[in-house]
Image (cartoon, helix red, strand yellow):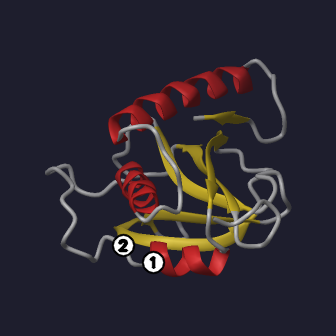
């Protein structure tokens, strides 16, 4: 397993944003990674989106990019999931295999959402022994929504850091 700070181990969390998904409940979910902090000038994000750059609805597609989380008016906060034993390039390759164009993943009749895609990626990271987890998908879903509501309340009261972070 990779050690902290060796370039092969990354913090991994779920960034929660308001009002981005068409048809989503509560929040848009995106995976976010960085070797040291989610407050970095640039972090790597992995997300499933259904809008183009102008905000018009599109088919679901994956979007991987370097970007700052600071300054986003839609960011509620980051739920820290753990430390993944992989480099950024390894994660790009690994997560790139799980886009909506693959038809071998059942969505339970609900179709694609950013939430479903993030849960799927987290589960595959865990199944590949890259991310130790002790929660079911349903437990993660409920807990992240609860933590999102708590962070949202903190923001509305003007409390917290530039990027609110809480642990799963």
Quadrant of the rendered structure where residue 8 is? Answer: bottom right
Image coordinates of residue 71 in percent, x first then y, are 80, 50
Residue farthest front in this picture = 1
Determine contact: label 1, label 2, CB under 8 Å: yes
Q: Nearer the viewer, residue 43 or 51?
A: 43
Rate crowding at label 2 as few (under 14), some (14 to 19) or many (20 or more) other CA atoms within 10 Å: some
What secondary structure is found at the residue carrying circle 1? helix
Residue underneath mark 1: 96
Q: Is residue 89 above or below residue 165?
A: below
Rate crowding at label 1 as few (under 14), some (14 to 19) or many (20 or more) other CA atoms within 10 Å: some
Image coordinates of residue 154 in percent, x first then y, are 72, 22
Residue drawn at (82%, 64%) of the image = 5
Q: Which mark is residue 99?
A: 2
The Cα atoms of the two marked residues, 1 and 2, are separated by: 6 Å
Q: Is residue 2 above or below residue 74?
A: below
Residue drawn at (74%, 36%) of the image = 164
Looking at the figure, which quarter contains the C terminus? top right
Looking at the figure, which quarter contains the N terminus? bottom right
What secondary structure is found at the residue carrying circle 2? loop
Q: Nearer the viewer, residue 154 or 91?
A: 91
Residue drawn at (85%, 62%) of the image = 41
Residue farthest left in this picture = 109
Quadrant of the rendered structure where residue 121 is? Answer: bottom left
């Amino acid at each position: 397993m990779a050690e902290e700070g060796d370039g092969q181990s990354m913090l991994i969390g779920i960034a929660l944003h308001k009002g981005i998904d068409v048809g989503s409940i509560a929040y848009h979910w995106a995976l976010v990674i960085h070797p040291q902090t989610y407050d970095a000038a640039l972090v790597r994000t992995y997300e499933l989106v259904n809008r183009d750059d102008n905000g018009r609805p599109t088919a679901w597609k994956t979007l991987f990019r370097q970007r700052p989380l600071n300054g986003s008016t839609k960011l509620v906060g980051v739920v820290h999931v753990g430390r993944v034993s992989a480099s950024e390039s390894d994660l790009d390759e690994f997560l790139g295999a799980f886009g909506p164009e693959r038809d071998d993943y059942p969505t339970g009749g609900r179709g694609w959402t950013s939430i479903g895609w993030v849960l799927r990626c987290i589960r595959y990271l865990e199944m590949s022994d890259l991310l130790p987890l002790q929660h079911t998908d349903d437990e993660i879903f409920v807990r992240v929504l609860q933590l999102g509501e708590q962070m949202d309340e903190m923001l509305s009261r003007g409390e917290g850091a530039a990027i609110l972070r809480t642990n799963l």
